[in-house]
Amino acid sequence: MEQQYPQDVSSYPPAPPPPRKRSGVITAVCVLVLVLAVSVILNESLLRIHWVRVQGISIVSWAEVVQAAELDKPVGYFTVSENKVAAGVNSHRYLIFERMEKQFPDTITIYVKERSPVARVQEMGTNYYLDDQGMVLEKNLLRVNSGSPDDMVVVTGLKPKELRVGRVIVAGTSEHMKAYEALFEELQLQGWLSQISELNITDPESIYLVTRDGYSAHLGGLSSLRAKIGTVRAVVAKLREMGKTGGMLEASVPGEAIYTPPVP
């Protein structure tokens, strides 16, 4: 008799799965671990930063920059962090980080900008020296090669709440600080900062400046500051040509300056 087999074979025991190729996976993992280990060893032992170049310094020493950037200790070429270097450099009161370049396999170049004292603020008999952004750089004595007290613009009327070396001055109001920064920026831009002996910003809406040869100018507020300072420059230059010495300029209206000679 012919034997009949059922059509549905799903009830039959399934065939055993093919053996997994575990040996290949294990080999790949081992190779990867080995590569990573070699990379770490190379980075830590061979690919280290051995040379640090610094561009943009004249007052601050190379060693100070390197120490601030925390590159005075062993660091791997691939693990050095630009954000960390920037934070370290910026923590130095005289330095502003600009950028960093890496030269394979062991060199880093750091580009910085130095802060320079341009203003002198006197508070409770103490002189504080500030840069054009209000960073307090020194107290009483200036750093070697950073300038002379006679070169600094005396700033009055800031009404400081806090004056600490290594910190930006906390002025009486935000408007005082805004006026401070705007004035120094514009005077530097027009190349006239060296002509100024004093800035009075007691009232940010009624600013006065005094030149080193005795001319006083009332600028009013910060609006049209470029035009006002430009007008004062031109008028003072003409007055000097005419042999005038000192006097008062009302220059709160852009493009106009009314001159009042000094009282005999």
Image (cartoon, rainbow, N blue to C red):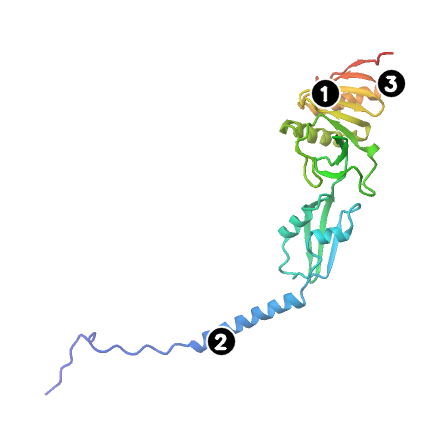
Residue furthest out toward the left: 1
Expressed as whole percent of the image width and height from the top left, the position of residue 249 reads 78, 17
Expressed as whole percent of the image width and height from the top left, the position of residue 10 reads 21, 74
**Viewed as shown, does residue 65 lie left or right of 214?**
left
Residue identified by numbered label 1: 219
Q: In which quarter of the image is residue 80?
A: bottom right
Q: Which part of the image, by quadrant, shows the N terminus?
A: bottom left
- Label for residue 27? 2
Circle 2 SS class: helix
Q: Nearer the viewer, residue 28 or 163?
A: 163
At a point 80% along the width and 39% down the height, the residue shown is: 142
Expressed as whole percent of the image width and height from the top left, the position of residue 122 reads 76, 30
Expressed as whole percent of the image width and height from the top left, the position of residue 102 reads 68, 56
Residue identified by numbered label 3: 245
Q: Which of 73 and 244 is in front in this view?
A: 73
The kind of residue tagged 3 is Thr
**Viewed as shown, does residue 170 lie left or right of 122?**
left
